[in-house]
Image: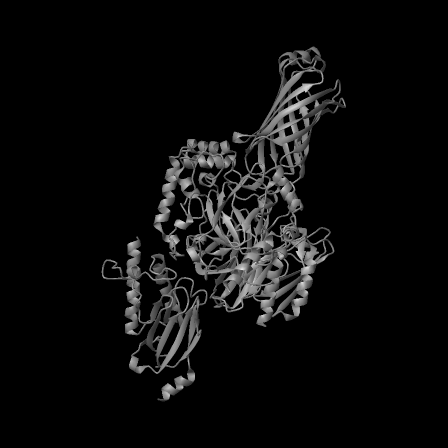
Amino acid sequence: MKTLTLSAFALALTLPSLPALGSDMPQDDTSRKDALTLWGVQFEELEYRYSDDDEELGVWNGDAFYGTDELKFRWQSKGEYAIEEEAYEKLENQLLLQTPVSDFFDAKAGVRFDTPEGPDRTYGVLGLTGLAPHWFEVDASLYVSDEGDTSAEFDAEYELLFTNHLILSAALDATVAFSEDREIGVGKGLVSTETGLRLSYDLIDRSFSPYLGVVHERKYGDTADLARAEGAGTEDWFAVIGARVSF
Amino acid sequence: MNASKLFVAAAAMSMTATTFAAGSHGGGHGSSIGEPGNAGDVSRTIQVEMHDNYYEPEAIEVARGETVRFVIENKGRLVHEFNIGTPEMHEAHQDEMKMMVEHGVIQGDKLNEDMMNMDMGNGQTMKHDDPNSILLEPGQKKEIIWTFSSKTNMEFACNIPGHYQSGMYGDVNFDSAADTQARAD
Amino acid sequence: MKNALMAGALGLLMPVMAAAGEYSLTVDRVMIDTGDFVKEGIGYNGASPGPVLRFKEGESVTINVTNNLDEPTSIHWHGLILPFEQDGVPGISFEGIQPGETFTYEFPIVQSGTYWFHSHSGFQEPNGAYGAIVIEPEGREPFRYDRDYVVQLTDKHPHDANRVMRNLKMMPDYYNRQQQTVGDFFADISKHGFMTALQDRLAWGDMRMMKADVEDVQGFTGLINGKGPEQNWTGLFEPGERIRLRFINSSAMAYFDIRIPGLEMTVVQADGNNVQPVNVDEFRIGVAETYDVIVRPKTAEAYTIFAESMGRSGYARATLAPEEGMEGPVPGLREAPLLTMADMSGMHGMDHGDMTGADASAGMDHSDMNQGEMDPDGMKDDSGMAADASDSMAGMDHSGMDHGAMIMSEGGASDPFYAEGSGLVPVAANGGKFLSYADLRAQKPLYEEREPTREIELRLTGNMERYTWSINGVKYEDAEPLRLQYGERVRFKFVNETMMTHPMHLHGMWSILDVGAGEWNPVKHVISVQPGTTVYMETEVDAPGQWAFHCHLSYHAASGMFRKVVVEGGPDQGNTAGAEVAKDGGDA
């Protein structure tokens, strides 16, 4: 009797180790087992600017991404369109690959194409983007142009919540050049800053948030000299109206 | 704080015992739930089984003036009570039982006798010794002899927190035929 | 193919079965009207929620599921003990149900109680693919009631679930409209002083964590049995009756705090298993949990069933009334809770070596909790407990984190299943009894008590900013299956290192929650693990095959907090099913 039970037990033990049973088990090849692949489109700025010397600009700063937690492809686009001149004062597109390097930061690398009115430039891009302590969204990029010039750009943004829908965001963008690229009006040293304050209201979720704001642009040092030499201004104040859009 | 609460509980419990002795506790309309009976007057024995958490049977028939021997056996795995009273009395008693649970006198599947007999400071204890009620550990079997008087809205119930609320009670139905019989006698 | 074969084999045995219920479900695109908005979703037999399936313990059920969608689907029978091929998880139990296909589930019903079913494919469940299961026991219930109602809750969101997932990934705070504002900062200043308020902000800002991060997905309308607060689902009663309410939380993300002002509730069942009755004024139901309560309204008035979400961003409402159309007062939402540093105490990488309070809770071993002391109501008035809580808060003040002046939660409410000093500890609206896991005791032990054969630690991990969720830091896509041996009793140690609550659900086998009551530990299918706490559960590994094991928050599971469990060894599944059937037949 005892032997019988024992052998039954032994049988029960050997059964599952038979390869036949193992291969019967479904393999999880559903999308659940794949990395979540997502996309998104965001325009931090999509606005009309009116300057203190009556210049009118259409401006955007947005990006679209596709990818996983581990690797994203990002297309970042910035432009400033002078409405009267019907010309792009600024038109830059970056194609980037982005991957996490810490809990809060991603490294990115790619190419940047500048195709405004005037000479074009192509750059190699290396950068870091993420969330710094105290909720500062920061983005730092290093560029090397096809002309061999290097420059760096630093972006920071901070949001102040008056309410959960009425939000004041402060943005600072600064560019530094390590060498001069006279053709595109860039002098060595601190090139320019753009500071903006925008008061937005989340009208439709976070998909559509109209805002009003002020933007201050300034050129510095050699870059300012180059601008003056061309008869252009070195400092502008803009009133802006626009919307933050995401979908 | 705790000590004074315990005292109140103990006092309340001895109070109910006293009122029973006086045989005048409120079932409303001057009715009475009856009183502890004498073994010599017993006309009938009713077996009641306690389970987790219900009785078998869930209704009994009694006659006015009848003295019944209840043999109560806890066939469950938890402590249960068998308590004869009106729904109002049960409700009042539930607060006391809650306190007994909170103070570890009733511990789910066993009773803490030491805690029960502990002197609360002035001769009062947490003893559960009302004559209309009995508290049984799993496997225990005890008796209550009870004489029913007038027809009253009565239930037998387990007032351990949650037990009554979830349905551990039974109806005490007064047999009207037997009533008539009793009156004729 | 194998399923078809098995179905065939079972089909042959059908005539000898004691009882066999046959059910049909169609999976359809439906419109869902919450009263606040109408949106397309997925339902069963033309409606969301689907029908209440009523089974009887001991019967064998046949359920024909026809997929009328243009995408694959599945149905998981949540909490039911059944052969793994019938469990309904595509890629783990079976291949799924293709569009146009009818799949036949067949399994014996070996339990009773309140359960539910839902799709386990993509985001069909948050999109509406769920329904209730009520199983009548073979014998009598250990409690009595005159009528019963299913009260099935969900958090219906106006956005399609795929979009919710995408938005959360893009902006983790996309749906959080309870973030601390400038106004809150000034309120904190006037309450706690400038330095304290500032230090508090700096401490949270330093971690890049939000204390208002209690509910990821806000903006939903709470539904009860498919009805929004305005549509007011109503259950009728006669005064004096005992009513059994079968609460099921079928939400994607929302925990609910449930109360019925004016009525005490007696909890008699949790996750389908009877518990020793506990009288409460309010209870919190985690996602995918069920609680059965008995209430006894004595007067002919309308009572409001009020279910506030844990983060107070939404609510569901229904009514118990003697007649249709009556309404009770509807309470307002209470103030939203805020996380405290105690809730962060499990966070990876935080130096909390000196945080006495936090360590005490993180390392909390529930088995120390007075073994065998059956004291369900005792927790509440235990002054020792309250003292512990305040001690630990004092302890945190002296912690090495240099957050000396942190703003802590108020009230000092305490529950052993929350971190000490947690901001999430629930308090009953009427100041009465709020159910704790610590109150739960099995009505009847399901298994013989024995020592676990081994312990497996599962750290619940994640990164809120990236909206990635994982177990032991590994997402499902990168994870090896968890291998268990048939016949062992495994002790799972959940360590929540995130600041979110995770309702962990193991398929196919019971989760015996360690509340320190030994053989009386309650038997569940979902174990809710609060931030900064360690919770233990034990599982008798008695179901061969492979099973899913995951956080039941839809967007956490989808972003990686998911595992496959393989039970190795044990009797061959096919034979077991056959044996079960034969046994049933023999009884007839």
Residue A167 found in image quarter: top right
- In terms of depth relative to the viewer, which is nearer, A235 or B19? B19
Q: Is C565 on the left-hand or right-hand side of A93?
A: left
Residue C134 found in image quarter: bottom right
Q: State the image coordinates of residue A228 (x, y, percent, origin top left).
A: 68, 12
Q: Is residue B56 above or below residue C365?
A: below
- The extreme front residue here reads A3
Q: State the image coordinates of residue C544 (x, y, percent, origin top left).
A: 58, 55
Q: Residue at x 49, y 56 (%)?
A: C523
Q: Is C585 on the left-hand or right-hand side of C431?
A: right
- The extreme left residue here reads B122
Q: Is residue A55 above or below residue C12?
A: above
Q: State the image coordinates of residue C415 (x, y, percent, origin top left).
A: 42, 49
The C terminus of chain C is located in which quarter?
bottom right
Q: State the image coordinates of residue A12 (x, y, percent, origin top left).
A: 57, 57
Q: Is C268 on the left-hand or right-hand side of A41?
A: left
Q: Is residue A230 above or below residue C456?
A: above
- In terms of depth relative to the viewer, which is nearer, C366 or B54? C366
Q: Is B126 on the left-hand or right-hand side of C96?
A: left
The N terminus of chain C is located in which quarter?
bottom right
